[in-house]
Image (spheres, rainbow, N blue to C red):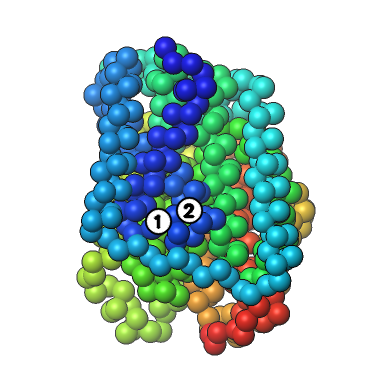
């Protein structure tokens, strides 16, 4: 049996190494963006680890073979690094960002270090309490324990989760339980503390990815302010304490948006690969991730209205459309698993009603829409603890500068963010539960999915509208 220190080292090192290989295979290296690269490695490595664990669970494994799977992941990372160096050119290093005095750059570096240390301190505090309550225990860890204790996706697992007394919402996407099962496998037992570790590293990944994205488009001082706004949000404290899926959706949304903008402004296809990894993380983490992907597609469709040539261009077969395969494969795996085990969702098919969510949205709309909208405005958008005015700032700039923003490449992401918010409001309107209670318990966590992406949008909008904040002349929309 390895020491605890060795276990923790491998839990971090193997996904990072695999992630570095996956990134290199699509053309992204450390020099591409020294600040965001480690965060991207964790995103890619977690997806790769989850995929291998998924296949392992299908084989009804003997968990004593965990060392062989560790070697497989390490070998896969090495192979991808070698193949990437041999075949795929690296994206050139990112520009240093807007010109700024040395003192300002030092300030930004100090803020990044402070926020990383703050997240680490919160995570260490969380490690003093076991995973034993709330959604992290009953929706996520419980499913991982079932996989570990019943030996993967075998008959014993199926018998357990079909028990109506086992747990609610068994149809949740499986990446979170796969990563926790991986922790259990390496420990050789069910843990109650270390299984938070993969998700606490997503917190650090969020900080690094946002910092890298901000530093590219605005001056370091303004980037530091936006990063501090993120660090002081309630969501950043909550997700350091819990092994839940909402943080992963937020990281996926931010990664997708950041990579999409880099592709739009450079034309380098490798960024589409990173955007595909972000979309896959969203889809494989929570159902809201699929909903956000639909919002992105809806934004693309809305932007193409009245432009037949653009619609034909989008529908024309292209090699880059192959990047849709990772998120679509993740989505198919969720549907197949849920169909195979008849997994249900307590929020969408509550025992007290046989109506579907769309039907409930329609029938409950007159009764609940006012209550839900008031809660979102007063308790989410305008409450600093939840969005630190990031979302009100987003709407203010859209209303104050509609022509310039709507004619730029900020239009599509803006539509996607609006569709996401409207969709979340409608979902809460249609829930067959105690809506005021559910709003208090989960609305803040759900809206946090798009808040880091909204902060990045604010940076791009500020760079376009206010040249002093960007350190350079704005580009024409």
Q: In the picture provided, is 120 more to the left or to the right than 65? A: right
Q: Considering only vertical position in the picture, is 261 above or below 206?
A: below
Instruction: Check the picture and name the quadrant holding the N terminus.
Output: top left
x, y percent for residue 54: 32, 32
To which residue does mark 1 refer?
29
Left or right: residue 477 versus residue 186 is right
Q: Residue at x 57, y 52 (%)?
A: 208
Helix, strand, or loop for circle 2?
helix
Q: Is residue 15 above or below residue 309?
A: above
Q: Is residue 397 visible?
A: no
Horizontal and vertical percent position of residue 337: 31, 34
Snapshot quadrant of residue 101: bottom right
Q: CA distance from mark 1 to mark 2?
A: 7 Å
Which residue is at a point 55% across and 62% down the rendered structure image? Answer: 213
Disc 1 to disc 2: CB gap under 8 Å: yes
Residue located beneath label 2 in the image: 37
The quarter of the displayed image where residue 67 is located: top left
**Is residue 304 shown to the viewer in this render?**
yes
At x 58%, y 43%, the residue is 203
Crowd rating for badge 2 (residues with CA inside 10 Å; few <14, some 14–19, many 20+): many
Name the one closer to the observer, 236 or 372. 236
Disc 1 or 2, which lies upstream in sequence?
Answer: 1
- Say above or below: 230 vs 403: above
The location of residue 153, given as percent across then percent down, is 30, 23
Front in this rendered view, residue 403 or 270: 270
> At 53% from the left edge and 81% from the top edge, which residue is drawn?
408
Residue nearest the viewer, comparing 45 with 392: 45
Q: 407 and 298: which one is in front? A: 407
Q: Secondary structure at mark 1?
A: loop
């Amino acid at each position: 049996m390895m020491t605890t220190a060795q276990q923790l080292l491998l839990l971090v090192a193997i996904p990072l190494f695999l992630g570095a290989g996956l990134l290199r295979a699509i053309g992204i290296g450390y020099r591409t963006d020294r600040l965001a690269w480690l965060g991207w490695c964790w995103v890619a490595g977690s997806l790769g680890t989850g995929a291998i664990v998924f296949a392992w669970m299908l084989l009804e494994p003997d968990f004593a073979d965990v060392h062989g799977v560790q070697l497989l992941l390490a070998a896969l990372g090495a192979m991808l690094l070698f193949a990437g160096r041999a075949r795929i050119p690296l994206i050139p290093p990112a520009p240093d960002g807007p010109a700024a005095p040395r003192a300002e750059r030092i300030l930004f570096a100090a803020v990044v270090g402070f926020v990383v240390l703050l997240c680490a301190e919160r995570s260490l505090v969380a490690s003093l309490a076991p995973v034993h309550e709330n959604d992290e225990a009953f929706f996520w860890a419980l499913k991982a324990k079932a996989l570990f204790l019943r030996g993967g996706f075998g008959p014993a697992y199926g018998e357990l989760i079909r028990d109506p007394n086992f747990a609610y919402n068994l149809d949740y996407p499986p990446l979170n339980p796969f990563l926790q099962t991986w922790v259990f496998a390496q420990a050789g037992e069910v843990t109650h503390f270390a299984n938070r570790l993969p998700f606490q590293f997503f917190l650090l990944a969020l900080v690094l990815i946002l910092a890298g994205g901000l530093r590219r488009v605005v001056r370091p001082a303004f980037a530091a302010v936006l990063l501090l706004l993120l660090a002081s949000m309630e969501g950043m404290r909550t997700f350091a304490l819990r092994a839940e899926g909402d943080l992963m959706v937020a990281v996926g949304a931010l990664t997708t948006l950041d990579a999409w903008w880099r592709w739009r402004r450079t034309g380098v296809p490798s960024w589409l690969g990173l955007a595909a990894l972000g979309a896959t993380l969203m889809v494989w983490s929570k159902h809201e991730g699929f909903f956000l992907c639909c919002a992105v597609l809806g934004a693309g469709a809305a932007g193409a209205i009245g432009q037949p040539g653009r619609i034909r261009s989008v529908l024309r077969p292209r090699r880059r459309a192959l990047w849709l395969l990772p998120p679509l494969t993740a989505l198919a795996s969720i549907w197949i698993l849920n169909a195979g085990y008849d997994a249900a969702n307590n929020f969408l098919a509550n025992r007290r009603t046989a109506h579907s969510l769309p039907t409930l949205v329609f029938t409950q709309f007159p009764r609940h829409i006012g209550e839900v909208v008031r809660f979102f405005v007063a308790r989410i958008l305008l409450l600093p603890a939840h969005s630190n005015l990031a979302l009100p700032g987003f709407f203010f700039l859209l209303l104050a500068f509609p022509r310039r923003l709507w004619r730029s490449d900020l239009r599509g992401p803006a539509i996607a963010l609006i569709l996401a918010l409207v969709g979340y409001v409608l979902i809460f309107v249609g829930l067959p539960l105690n809506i005021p209670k559910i709003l208090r318990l989960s609305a803040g966590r759900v809206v946090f999915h798009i808040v880091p992406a909204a902060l990045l949008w604010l940076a791009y909008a500020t760079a376009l509208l206010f040249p002093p904040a960007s350190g350079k002349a704005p580009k024409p929309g």
